[in-house]
Image (tube, grey):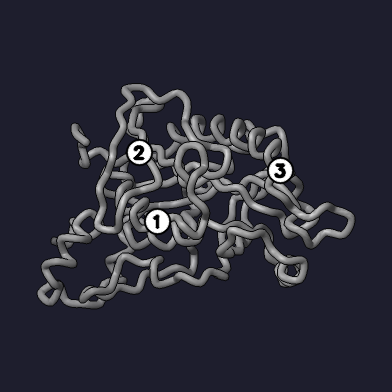
Amino acid sequence: MSGIDSAEPAIGVIGGSGLYQIEGLEDIEEHNVKTPYGDPADAIIGGRLSGRRVFFLPRHGRGHRILPHELNHRAHIWALRSLGVRWIIAVTAVGSLQEKYVPRDIVLPDQFFDRTSRRCEHTFFGEGICAHVAFGEPVSSELRGILYQSASEIHKGCVHDGGTYVNMDGPAFSTRSESLFNHKLGFDVIGMTNLAEAKLAREAEVSLATLAMITDYDCWKTGEEAVTADAVISHLNANAAAAKEIIADAIPRIPVAANWPEHCALDSALVTDAELWPEKTRRKLEPILGRFI
């Protein structure tokens, strides 16, 4: 890893199922970032797109080698933040929990519901430094708005602005009972990856928004076959192609200055006095706490 200019805020793209590369990047360089939490899923691909510094990380590794519950979310967000990333576009495949969302539609969630079991791994803090970030609005409204504008102009299917993403552990899909329960509660989409990314991005003072690409109806819908891995592959390929176009259009719309509310999320979150921070933890969190050190 070399030549990183952290003074120029960068844009990160986390690719989900079916999206393992980003096209149009120039001056490409691979970054094998070592983090205190272990290695990311794959090398991070850096380059320039529409004049902006962009870093791409395939969430599951190239070739889709890593299951959702095996993902090292802290390594992913720490690595991107260490490269100067201040915005993240997260692309994720999801199941629809409501009739109005059909396969190949796009949903831009504005809320999450947590059904995960490893929440202690969804924070950078602890080990002598306490922080409690505000998470009532877990998605950047500004970045979501940019994605909605780009998606509405490009995508041939329906684009839905807002909705609640239920995050389950996986790797198995829902039982019918679970799916009906989530449907009746009025949740919108279900997936296995995005909530941890949103929590950690907020702690890292990174603005994040999600392109949730519908591949199936989970298994709540009467008359529809229950979701299987085989059943979603054709939708994944179509969704990935759409995502690439939307990302390429959205990136030049993102402002150069990192001055959105998420970029100062720790101002009101840090509890422990800096004089009491253990040196080991301070060093570990330097990419995140840099402006306080």
Gap between marks 2 and 1, in whole Å? 14 Å
User: At x 89% / y 55%, what residue is drawn?
Assistant: 223
Could you say which quadrant of the image residue 163 lies in? Answer: bottom right
- Residue situated in front as seen by the camera: 23 or 164: 23
Q: What element carries label 1?
A: loop
Q: Position of residue 1 (x, y in %)?
A: 22, 36
User: At x 32% / y 58%, what residue is drawn?
Assistant: 204
Q: Which of marks 2 and 3 is in front?
A: 3
Residue 238 shown left or right of residue 148 in the figure? right
User: At x 40% / y 52%, what residue is drawn?
Assistant: 207
Q: Nearer the viewer, mark 3 or mark 1?
A: 3
Image vertical order of residue 235 relative to residue 269, above or below: above
Please say if the residues under marks 3 and 1 sit with CB atoms less than 8 Å apart: no
Whether residue 146 appears in this view of the structure is no
Q: Where is residue 70 in the image (x, y as percent from the top left)?
A: 46, 57
Gap between marks 2 and 3, in whole Å? 28 Å
Query: Which numbered disc flags the more N-terminal residue, 3 or 1?
Result: 1
Which residue carries the number 1 mark? Answer: 72
Please say if the residues under marks 2 and 1 sit with CB atoms less than 8 Å apart: no
Query: Which numbered disc flags the more N-terminal residue, 2 or 3?
Result: 2
Name which residue type carries label 3. Answer: Asp
The disc placed on residue 44 is 2
Q: Label 1 crowding class (10 Å Cα cut-off): few <14, some 14-19, many 20+?
A: many
Q: Label 2 crowding class (10 Å Cα cut-off): few <14, some 14-19, many 20+?
A: many
Query: Which numbered disc flags the more N-terminal residue, 2 or 1?
Result: 2
Which residue carries the number 3 mark? Answer: 230
Name which residue type carries label 2. Answer: Ile
